[in-house]
């Protein structure tokens, strides 16, 4: 579809301008004032146009457990998560759909799904979420979540745990699954990319990491992993490598300009230098970092050092939402308490650039995405500036980032395809999705996790908590 | 109006139950199962019923500047705010209306408006917001924001500032205005209360505080003030009193069980003991504390010491929203990073109790409000648990507090009067409000504050920031 947006507000260096944007066959072909209308006319009056944000780290399947896991740190929260993980494809499909919808309705046009795989049905899991994202029309980066060590290995002194067992699948088998997923599904030009996605240093051997590097090099895949989310992981890295996790990842060649790492809460200054040097990206997930008590990632330090930053919602049971505008707001203002010099605080315009171009850079796709530039793909969002939550009128991006925008998405295009029109999704029936989510779930409370009971005393000991 | 809610989900000690609630003439008359329907039948199926939250600290007029003030600490942010404060009654009316609407649509039934008064039109300002809140139907606690020292006195070593001048109104004149407001407008039984509301130690003499105490005693008024929002205020208190601000407020008799104090970011352990001893309340405003870089209030320590806590949005230009559910979420999860022992972390149910009963206690009205109890006033909210943002179904209060609920308010009653029905306000026309807010404002960016230029170098010096 070809279209021309007329007279939408758009940020410039100082303030705003009104802009026309021509889109032909999914590509931005002209940007300027007084452009001719090619294709459908889109009235941008009283609307703000921005590139689509990247939801640069999430786990779609967690949606089935949002709101139910008690306030716990990551290592114990994981026990709950794993004990009650849903295991059927219908749920996998619906949670991907729901994650995509909430991302779109909060300004996102791309989602990075660090995808939990159902054991024995790995490729089917991947195929299922791709079907959901393609049906919905959101751009999807699927990083199959892989590990080759058991959950108990993820804790310092984890080998002491009685339940420590070998992981169910060998490293080679796991890498073979990822390679097959690449062969079957990696079609960036059609809006679906496969990433290599080792879980993180806490659950992966070096062999898995270097196997991922080899696949990434062979197929030009972006790389994605968790990194130093918790204090416990910092301890574990010291145990495992006798150096920092970042140093180790650099040494084994995992870090490059298309590597994005979720969290980075426990980075030290040397780590930050390495990330800047290797042009790696930190995906900031402020809400899950708070919810799990992980800490505050040193984002201002990273920015000063030149590290690229993007925003993620993280999985919906550690957040517990998929609202990108919420993640962007909190991920911006949270850091004001970490530096008394307000001159380094993140401005709303900077936040938007991190969410757009920062997201694209983290995936190595900034030549095609992340800004409103002639020749780039038309992943665009129009915000309705007459929505109550954006009134009275002041600074549009200030309102969007610092406020609490509700019902503000007027239109969304992905690859030039209209996914949201007049605030309504064009590709799926929201009421049907609601009904499915409702029917396949029930009210719950006070759920007990058997695994939690097994590992809690170990966790309290290694974290020096009173018993 | 009499009505009976049937079969709504309601939290009990362990999990949830379905509840019927009978309301007659604004009072909850029966709570239980299988109650007869008196008056209108309200179907509670797939809905959660909670007492209304308290938006326990805000400044409605700030709404005109939300999204526009750059990232700055309180003392410099105030310069922007004051330089561009709107000065007409129509704007005062509309921002109160908007503040009330956003509070209602995020689960609040009471608002504490620490109300900026237009000089020379103080009583008219108060009358105007009361008209707005009464038209809308929200319960209002109006604390006229009073001071008797000029803005520059609010900074450490502020007397050094060249622009330091005496305040425009004498202490006695100011107290006379508050007393007149009490005589004219204080009608708690009609849903409008006047509070004494000295701005805070940074801008008030002891004479103003003790004058407020006298008025509070004479008319049984609740007391409200800011307290230790910033590091600079902590320094100022040491300069001014040679003891902590809390100790000083205790000594002059300002602290009692109907005193609520906004922020308390820089409380020390002794301060917390004093607050517990005097049964004072801290109103936690997490979003403005982050936005202004003030810090993290020691809420877990307060709770352990038995200090009552409630939640506020704070004014909409330091937040920059009036969404109580957002304040409750961030005000709950933020503290997980302050204590590694997760057993002290705030649970979603605890948050709800703080937002309801905590809010009522802070205003000394917990005998009438803050819980679903026979004999209390019917300030009730029904949440639609079939909304997309609350699906799939898990723990209803977990979803509400930890998620990002959007469009979830089904019904709201204040004093038994239906204010929201089927998600729509019954008392005002939202589209008219939007149009008014739109018409009286314009897109802005890059606003320069003349006062900021005058005080910034002083601020940087006293806060030991590089120049």
Image (cartoon, coloured by chain):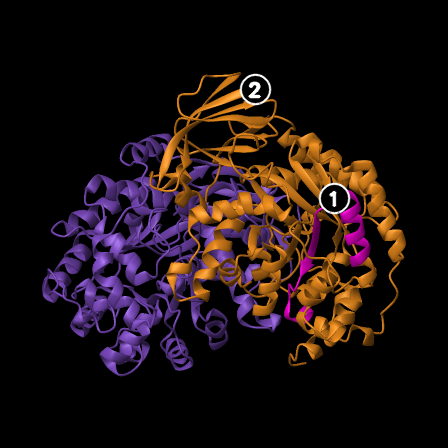
Chain colours: A orange, B purple
Q: Nearer the viewer, residue B157 or B137?
A: B157
Residue A303 is inside the magenta segment? no
Nearer mark to the viewer, of 1 and 2 = 1
Q: Which residue is mark 1?
A: A220
Q: Residues within 10 Å of mark 2 (few under 14, many from 20)?
A: some
Which residue shows up at 60% across the image and 66% down it?
A267
Visible in this render: residue A61? Answer: yes
Q: Is A221 located above or below residue B360 in the figure?
A: above
Which residue shows up at 67% across the image and 61% down it?
A227
What x and y, as percent, mark residue B5?
53, 43
Q: Which residue is mark 2?
A: A2
What x and y, as percent, mark residue B390?
60, 45
Name the quadrant containing residue B86: top left
What x and y, as percent, mark residue A41?
48, 18
Distance from disc 1 to disc 2, alpha carbons, whole Å, reads 31 Å
Question: At numbered mark 2, what does the secondary structure look like: helix, strand or loop?
Answer: loop
Q: Chain of mark 1?
A: A
Q: Earlier in the sequence, mark 1 or mark 2?
A: 2
First to last magenta residue range: A209-233
Visible in this render: residue A437? Answer: no
Name the quadrant containing residue B398: bottom right
Which residue shows up at 30% across the image and 33% down it?
B436
Left or right of B36, for residue B306 = left
Residue A210 is inside the magenta segment? yes
Q: Residues within 10 Å of mark 1 (few under 14, many from 20)?
A: some
Which numbered circle lies on residue B247? none
């Amino acid at each position: 579809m070809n279209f021309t947006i007329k007279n939408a507000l758009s940020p410039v260096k100082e303030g705003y301008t009104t802009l026309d944007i021509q889109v032909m066959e999914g590509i931005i072909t002209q940007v300027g004032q007084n452009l001719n209308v090619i294709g459908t006319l889109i009235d941008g009056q009283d609307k703000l146009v921005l590139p689509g944000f990247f939801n640069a780290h999430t786990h779609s399947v967690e949606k089935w457990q949002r709101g139910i896991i008690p306030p716990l740190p990551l290592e114990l929260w994981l026990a709950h998560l794993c004990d009650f993980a849903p295991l059927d494809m219908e749920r996998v499909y619906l949670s991907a759909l729901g994650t995509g919808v909430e991302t779109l309705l909060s300004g996102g046009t791309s989602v990075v799904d660090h995808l939990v795989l159902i054991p024995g049905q790995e490729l089917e899991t991947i195929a299922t979420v791709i079907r959901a994202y393609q049906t919905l029309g959101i751009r999807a980066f699927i990083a199959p979540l892989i590990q080759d060590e058991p959950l108990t290995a993820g804790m310092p002194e984890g080998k002491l745990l009685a339940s420590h067992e070998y992981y169910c699948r060998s490293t080679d088998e796991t890498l073979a699954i990822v390679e097959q997923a690449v062969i079957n599904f990696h079609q960036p030009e059609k809006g679906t990319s496969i990433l290599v996605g080792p879980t993180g240093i806490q659950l992966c051997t070096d062999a898995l990491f270097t196997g991922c590097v080899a696949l990434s090099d062979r197929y030009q895949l972006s790389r994605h992993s968790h990194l130093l989310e918790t204090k416990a992981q910092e301890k574990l890295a010291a145990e495992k490598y006798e150096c920092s996790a970042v140093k180790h990842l650099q040494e084994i060649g995992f870090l490059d300009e298309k590597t994005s790492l979720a969290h980075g809460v426990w980075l030290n200054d040397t780590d930050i230098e390495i990330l800047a040097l290797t042009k790696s990206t930190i995906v900031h997930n402020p809400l899950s970092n708070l919810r799990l008590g992980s800490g505050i990632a040193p984002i201002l330090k990273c920015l000063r050092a030149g590290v690229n930053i993007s925003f993620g919602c993280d999985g919906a049971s550690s957040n517990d939402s998929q609202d990108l505008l919420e993640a962007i707001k909190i991920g911006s203002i949270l850091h004001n308490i970490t530096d008394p010099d307000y001159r380094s605080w993140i401005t709303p315009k900077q936040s938007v650039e991190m969410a757009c171009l920062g997201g694209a850079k983290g995936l190595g796709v900034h030549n095609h995405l992340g800004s409103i530039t002639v020749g780039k793909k038309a992943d665009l969002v129009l915000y309705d500036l007459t929505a109550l939550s954006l009134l009275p009128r002041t600074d549009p991006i200030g309102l969007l980032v610092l406020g609490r925008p509700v019902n503000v998405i007027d239109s969304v295009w992905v690859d030039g395809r209209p996914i949201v029109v007049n605030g309504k999704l064009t590709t799926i029936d929201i009421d049907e999705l609601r009904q499915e989510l409702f029917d396949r779930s029930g009210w719950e409370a006070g759920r007990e996790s058997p695994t939690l009971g097994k590992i809690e005393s170990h966790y309290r000991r290694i974290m020096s908590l009173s018993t």
